[in-house]
Amino acid sequence: MIKKPIERAFNEQIKHELESAYLYLAMSAYFVGQALDGMAQWMRVQAQEELAHAMRFFDSIHDRGGTVDLAALEVLEKTWGSPLSAFEAAFAHEQFITGKIGELVDLARREKDHAADLFLQWFVGEQIEEEASVSKVVDLLKRVGDSPQGLILADRELGARSAPTNPGSGGGE
Ligand code: OFO
C-alpha cells in the first residue's frame, strides 16, 4: 500500500509531467506558426514522452492501491522570441523536472519506501537523457546563429525524430 505522502507527491508529479506535455505541445504549435515543421515534430514527440511519464506515475499509484487525484493544469508559456529561446526554455524546464525527481527520491528514502525509490530510479536515468537531448539542440541552434540556411537544415534534422512506439504505456523512450 502506498503511503499518503508518497501518493500526494506522485499526484503532484503527474501534474508536472502533464504540464511538461502541455508546454511542449505549445512549443510545437509555436514552431508550426514559424513554418518550422521539423522542430514542431520534435516537440510533438517530446509531448508524447511526457504523457508517457505521467502515465508511469498514474499506473504506479494504482498498482500500489492508491488514488489518483488529478489537479488543474497551469498554462506555462505560449510563445517565444526565437527557436533558440524556446529550446533554452525547454532545457530550463527539464532542469526543474530533474529537481522534482530528486525531491521525490529524497522523500521516498525518508519514508523508507523502497518500491517508490526503485520506481524513481528510472526517472533519474531518464532525466539525464532528457537534459542531454535538449541541450544538444540548444548547442545546435547556437551554432546556426542567424543563418536562415542553417535553420532550415537544423529543422530538417530535428524533424527526423520518430514518435515513441506506445506513448500511453509509460515507456516513452
Ligand atoms: Fe521531460 O521529463 Fe518528464 O517531465
Image (tube, rainbow, N blue to C red):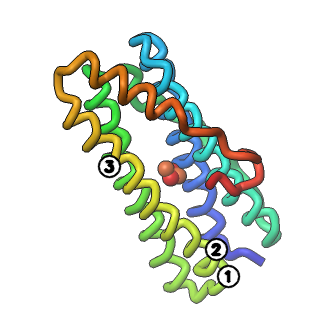
Q: Are marks 2 and 3 in contact (CB under 8 Å)?
A: no
Residue 115 is tagged as 1
Name the residue tied to disc 3.
Answer: 135
User: On the rendered structure, is 117 left or right of 82?
Assistant: right
Q: Position of residue 88 (x, y in %)?
A: 28, 39
109 is higher (above) or lower (below) than 18 = below
Under circle 1, the secondary element is: helix
**Which amino acid type is shown beneath numbered disc 1?**
Ala
Q: Position of residue 63 (x, y in %)?
A: 81, 68
Q: How far separated are the C-alphas under marks 2 and 3?
A: 25 Å
Q: Are marks 1 and 2 in contact (CB under 8 Å)?
A: yes
Query: Viewer-proximal residue, 61 or 49?
Result: 49
Is residue 63 visible to us here?
A: yes
Residue 36 is tagged as none
User: On the rendered structure, is 91 left or right of 167?
Assistant: left
Name the residue tied to disc 2.
Answer: 119
66 is higher (above) or lower (below) than 36 = below
108 is higher (above) or lower (below) than 38 = below
**Which amino acid type is shown beneath numbered disc 2?**
Phe
Closer to the chain start, of discs 3 and 1, is 1
